[in-house]
Image: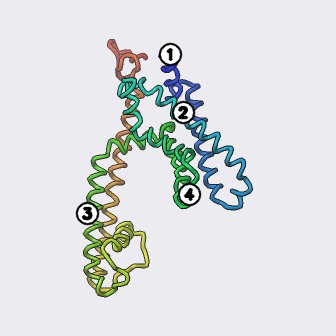
Amino acid sequence: MLKIRKRLFQLLEGTEPIGRILQLSLMTLIALNVVAVMVNSVQDLATQWQRPLHQFELFSVTIFSIEYLLRLWVAPERAAYAHPLWGRLRYLVTPLAILDLLAVLPAFLPVTLDLRFLRAVRMMRMLRVARMTRYSKALKTIRGVLADRRDELLATASVLLLVVVLASSLMFEIEHDAQPTVYTSIPATLWWAIATLTTMGIDIRPITPLGRLLAGCIAICGVGLFAIPAGILGSGFVEKYMAQRSAKKMCPHCGKSLEEPAEGGAGHVA
């Protein structure tokens, strides 16, 4: 049984050719699910293709549910989840496991829910596209960069949040008397601050000289503040790329660089 579990773990992780084919098949199924959700949002197509779409949804949910249960079963193959019980419980609360669950959850919810909530739950099927991060090397790299730069990104997000709140508060105090129906409260002014910081542009504009001055300063600050995360991510991608490139030049057997000359002047042979 342990050999079967280990073999299955290798297949799900794509460490073998058959495993990579399995991952490609799951990625294709995820992409087709996204297309199906988009088609289902078109009323005429949803009516015309109701039965095939429903059958495809049942098939997809079955496959994803089986994969979810299998991944839960093979979780102890990882050192972090080695315990047969507590390890699996820890695995259940990992982001990828939660994402896998949310991708199939709408199919198991009762249909007697409020229709507005039901529509929102059905749209959770779009989360299946996010599951591609499990199979795509490029998306795994992005996930790794975000994890490595988490502290810097959180610090930048904290500064952005502080600027948004301060800008909203100041603009409310300046413009409320001049435009009481537009700048009705600080929470309502938050939308203006976000749109101004991102230079998106909206119809809500200050009319007082002081308000326009503040809006200009906020817009200029927004250009610089949003450039910081771009720089953080850019440097993270460069470091990740260089680390991956260096790892490829290391001998998998002895751990030495393949470019370093061996003793006697001959190059290292893997």
Q: Amino acid at mark 3?
A: Leu
Q: Amino acid at mark 2?
A: Glu
Report helix, strand or loop for mark 3: helix
Q: Crowdedness of circle 1 by 10 Å Cα count: few (<14), some, many (20+)?
A: few
| Labels in figure, total | 4
Q: Which mark is residue 119?
A: 4
Seen from the viewer's position, the closer of residues 58 and 245 is: 58
Residue 255, image quadrant: top left
Q: Amino acid at mark 1?
A: Met
The residue lying at 56 percent from left, 37 percent from top is: 64
Residue under label 1: 1
Report helix, strand or loop for mark 1: loop
Q: Crowdedness of circle 4 by 10 Å Cα count: few (<14), some, many (20+)?
A: few
Say which label, 3 or 2, has the lower sequence index: 2
Say which label, 4 or 2, has the lower sequence index: 2
Q: Amino acid at mark 4?
A: Arg
How far apart are the alpha carbons under marks 3 and 4?
A: 34 Å
Say which label, 2 or 1, has the lower sequence index: 1
How far apart are the alpha carbons under marks 3 and 2?
A: 42 Å
Say which label, 4 or 1, has the lower sequence index: 1
Residue under label 3: 162
Say which label, 1 or 3, has the lower sequence index: 1
Q: How is the structure coloured here?
A: rainbow
